[in-house]
Image: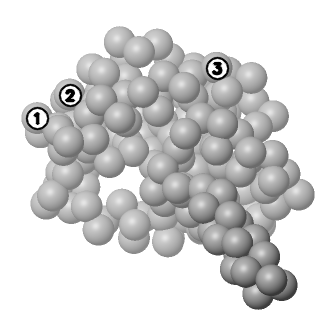
Amino acid sequence: MKKILTILFIALLGCSQSDFQLKTVNAAALHKQIATHKGKEAVLVNFWATTCAPCLKEFPMIVELSNKYKDNGIKIYFVTTDWTDYKDRAIAFLEKQGVKGVTFIKEEGNDNNFIRAINDDWSGALPFTIVFDKNGNITDHWEMEKDKTRFESAIKKAIES
């Protein structure tokens, strides 16, 4: 009986795991991940934090667009810039939003170096979104919360490039 309960408990834990992986990433590793899509699909990367109200406000819309365009040639990645002390908060938020696949948490360290390595035009303000075409070229980027129209326009431009 104990073996059956143990197996049942392990099975329940396995079933309750999220459909996403939260990986720690630095700027170089993130660029390497983006490069894996070169020649195949465009990429949109959204940088956010659980402490950023505008990030949390636009997040469900980005998830919706990710689901809408996933079969049209774009991959969307989320990178939380939360400190590792907030990792559990980030995981809970991602689960609540129904995020699937690989998502990232920024490696702790020199934030200014990370920001510069991602994009010279990024001041560090959140949310920050950067879009790459199928050739790995930046087609658009912006700081602060934007509406669905702006996101869809950037996605369509990157897919068509």
Q: Assess disc 1: are there few (<14), some (14-19) or many (≥20) residues with their C-alpha within 10 Å of its C-alpha.
A: few
For disc 1, the marked residue is: 160
SS for tag 3? helix
Indicate whether 143 appears above or below 17: above
For disc 2, the marked residue is: 156
Residue 31 falls in image quadrant: bottom left
Q: Hey, what amino acid is under mark 1?
A: Glu
Front residue of 5/78: it is 5
Residue 131, horizontal then vertical, whole percent: 35, 40
Q: Hey, what amino acid is under mark 2?
A: Lys
Residue 67 falls in image quadrant: top left
Q: Assess disc 2: are there few (<14), some (14-19) or many (≥20) residues with their C-alpha within 10 Å of its C-alpha.
A: some
For disc 3, the marked residue is: 57
Side of 86 relative to 23 (left or right): right
Indicate whether 41 appears above or below 113: above
Q: Quadrant of the C terminus?
A: top left
Tell me which label, 3 or 1, sits earlier in the chain: 3
Separation of marks 3 and 1 at Cα, in angstroms: 28 Å
Separation of marks 2 and 1 at Cα, in angstroms: 6 Å
Which residue is farthest bottom?
3
Dot in front, 3 or 1: 3
Asked if residue 87 can be seen in this view, the reply is yes
SS for tag 2? helix
Front residue of 115/41: it is 41
